[in-house]
């Protein structure tokens, strides 16, 4: 679950992250057909894939995010669809590759995750690949139950030019890990206007996750701890999965 943030601020904050783009582009080059970008948001991953010449369908539930992406659309190979990716309104066996970047997978409630995986498998061609990146549950379990927000950077709001300071912290209880971001608009006259956004991750054991993949007719090809295919370890920051539909 994620509380809302304007697409402008979301993209200014998260759009600068590019460490994972070579990973998704490599998967696209290996695929032999259309790509489904799940939770495409403002297009941080979907747009570079399309700009590289790959046919991409980007799906997001937010009309605001899709509108922002449409306004910066520069690739004829990108089509956008407003829909809930838990109930994909797409034909079976339509895609060679489906990607779910940006730690979005673990925002899906645990009880909805098996059906989500079955839905992704349904729209993939036989032998198609599904790849995701998520926080690594064993690593998150080692974090303190709570962390006070600390500054992590900032940006200038594109529309107003106002400096924005970003700080983040978290709260962890049971299988729920909630990340809290504060966006402080620092006006020249000294006023500070704060926007607060939360994102809750629901963390299952990886054995449970692997069982859900198997039940959805996926074979896991690789589990990595980063985007350079470093083998997964319990203390890795990420759980990056590549799986193939049977």
Image (tube, rainbow, N blue to C red):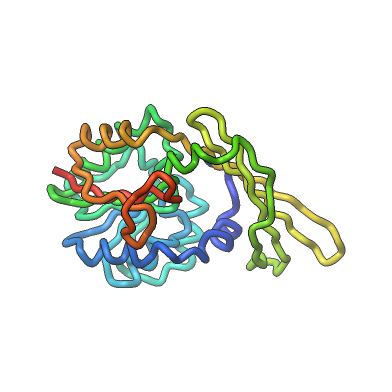
- The answer, for residue 57, to whether it is visible in the render is yes
For residue 116, which quarter of the picture? top left
Q: Nearer the viewer, residue 162 or 213?
A: 213
Q: Is residue 81 visible?
A: no
Between residue 230 and residue 133, name the one nearer to us: 230
Report the side of 4 relative to 76 (left or right).
right
Q: How many numbered circles does the render carry?
A: 0
Query: From the viewer's perspective, is residue 106 above or below residue 188?
Result: above
**What x and y, as percent, mark residue 231?**
31, 53
What x and y, as percent, mark residue 19?
Answer: 43, 65
Q: Residue at x 46, y 54 (%)?
A: 41
On screen, residue 117 versus residue 82, left or right, reads left
Quadrant for residue 113, please give it. Answer: top left
- Residue at (49, 41) in percent of width and height: 140
Q: Position of residue 162 (x, y in %)?
A: 73, 66
Quadrant housing the C terminus = top left
Q: Is residue 149 left or right of residue 90?
A: right
Q: Image check: 218 left or right of 43?
A: left
Residue 63 vs 152, above or below: the answer is: above
Work out whether residue 244 or residue 94 is closer to the camera in this orientation and state it. 244
**Which residue sits at x=58%, y=60%?**
13
Q: Residue drawn at (60%, 35%), measured in percent from left and top? A: 145
């Amino acid at each position: 679950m994620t509380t809302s943030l304007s697409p402008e601020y979301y993209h200014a904050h998260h759009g600068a992250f590019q460490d994972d783009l070579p990973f998704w582009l490599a998967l696209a080059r290996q695929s032999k057909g259309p790509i489904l970008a799940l939770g495409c948001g403002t297009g941080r991953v979907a747009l570079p894939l399309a700009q590289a010449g790959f046919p991409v369908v980007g799906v997001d539930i937010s009309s605001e995010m899709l509108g922002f992406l449409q306004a910066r659309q520069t690739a004829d190979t990108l089509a956008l669809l407003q829909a809930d990716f838990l109930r994909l309104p797409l034909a079976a066996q339509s895609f060679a590759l489906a990607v779910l970047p940006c730690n979005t997978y673990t925002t899906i409630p645990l009880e909805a995750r098996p059906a989500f995986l079955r839905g992704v498998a349904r729209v993939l061609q036989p032998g198609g690949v599904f790849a995701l990146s998520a926080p690594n549950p064993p690593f998150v379990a080692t974090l303190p139950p709570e962390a006070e927000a600390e500054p992590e950077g900032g940006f200038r709001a594109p529309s107003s030019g106002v400096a924005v300071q970003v700080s983040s912290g978290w709260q962890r209880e049971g299988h729920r890990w909630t990340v809290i971001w504060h966006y402080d608009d620092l006006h020249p006259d000294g006023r500070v206007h704060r926007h607060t956004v939360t994102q809750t991750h629901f963390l299952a054991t990886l054995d449970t996750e692997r069982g859900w993949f198997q039940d959805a007719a996926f074979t896991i090809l690789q589990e990595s701890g980063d985007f350079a295919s470093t083998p997964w370890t319990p203390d890795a920051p990420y759980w990056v999965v590549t799986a193939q539909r049977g």
